[in-house]
Image: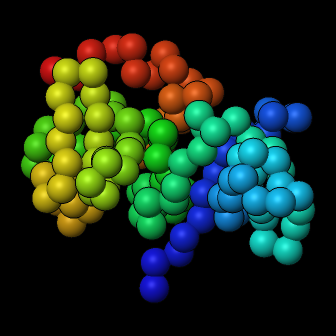
């Protein structure tokens, strides 16, 4: 069964919070992450990302907004991970957008977490040809 969880940067501490994502509920900040068995943590909604139910080659969980070094039959490069508007897991570079079958995990030879677009925006500044 697919694990549903999110992460977001705490407005108070700037640290990443992991858990359930809630917004607009009574007694809860506008956007919050609620850790399992914990209290809501107000987060910046721009940083909220869903767990993609995949891990990199070292076993690190991958979330929307993560930046990965990817090697597959579609090529190599540094890409941002995303869930597209139509629900596909996708990868994004500033030059091309590939979604659906082309980036299915079974065709990825190697995936390494490099950082994320919030803490490491410089990772996306180099071109992906």
Residue lying at 34% horizontally and 14% vertically, measured from the top left? 126
The answer to whether 19 appears left or right of 67 in the picture is right
Residue 5, by quadrant, is bottom right
Percent x, y for residue 82? 38, 45
- In this rendering, the answer to whether 90 lies above or below 127 is below
Visible in this render: residue 109? no
| Residue 106 rendering spot, x and y as whole percentages | 21, 66
Seen as rendered, the residue at the extreme bottom is 1
Front-lying residue, 51 or 39: 39
Residue 23 visible (yes or no): yes
User: Along the line of sight, which residue is nearer the eye, 108 or 102?
Assistant: 102
Residue 58 location, x and y as percent? Answer: 49, 57
User: What residue is drawn where x is 83% and y is 55%?
Assistant: 28
Which quarter of the picture shows residue 78? top left
Quarter holding the C terminus? top left
Q: Where does the image place residue 65, in percent across and percent down from the top left? A: 48, 39
Q: Which of 3/24 is in front? A: 24
Q: Which quadrant would the N terminus be assigned to in this image?
A: bottom left
Q: Residue at x 68, y 64 (%)?
A: 20
Q: Quadrant of residue 39?
A: bottom right
Q: With 56 as the anchor, is 32 left or right in this view?
A: right
In the image, taking residue 114 as reference, residue 71 lies left or right, namely left
- Look at the image and name its color scheme: rainbow
Q: How many marks?
A: 0
Rendered view: 59 above or below 94: below
Residue shown at 70%/36% (left/top)?
Answer: 44
């Amino acid at each position: 069964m697919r694990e549903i969880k999110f992460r977001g940067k705490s407005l108070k501490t700037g640290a990443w919070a992991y858990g359930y994502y809630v917004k607009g509920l009574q007694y809860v900040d506008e956007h919050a992450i609620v850790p399992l068995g914990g209290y809501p943590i107000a987060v910046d909604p721009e940083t909220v990302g869903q767990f993609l139910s995949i891990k990199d080659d070292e076993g690190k969980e991958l979330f929307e907004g993560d930046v990965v070094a990817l090697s597959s039959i579609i090529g190599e490069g540094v890409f941002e991970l995303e869930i597209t508007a139509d629900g596909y897991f996708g990868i994004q570079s500033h030059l091309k957008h590939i979604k659906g079958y082309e980036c299915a995990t079974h065709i990825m030879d190697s995936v390494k977490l490099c950082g994320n677009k919030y803490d490491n925006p410089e990772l996306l500044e180099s071109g992906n040809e």
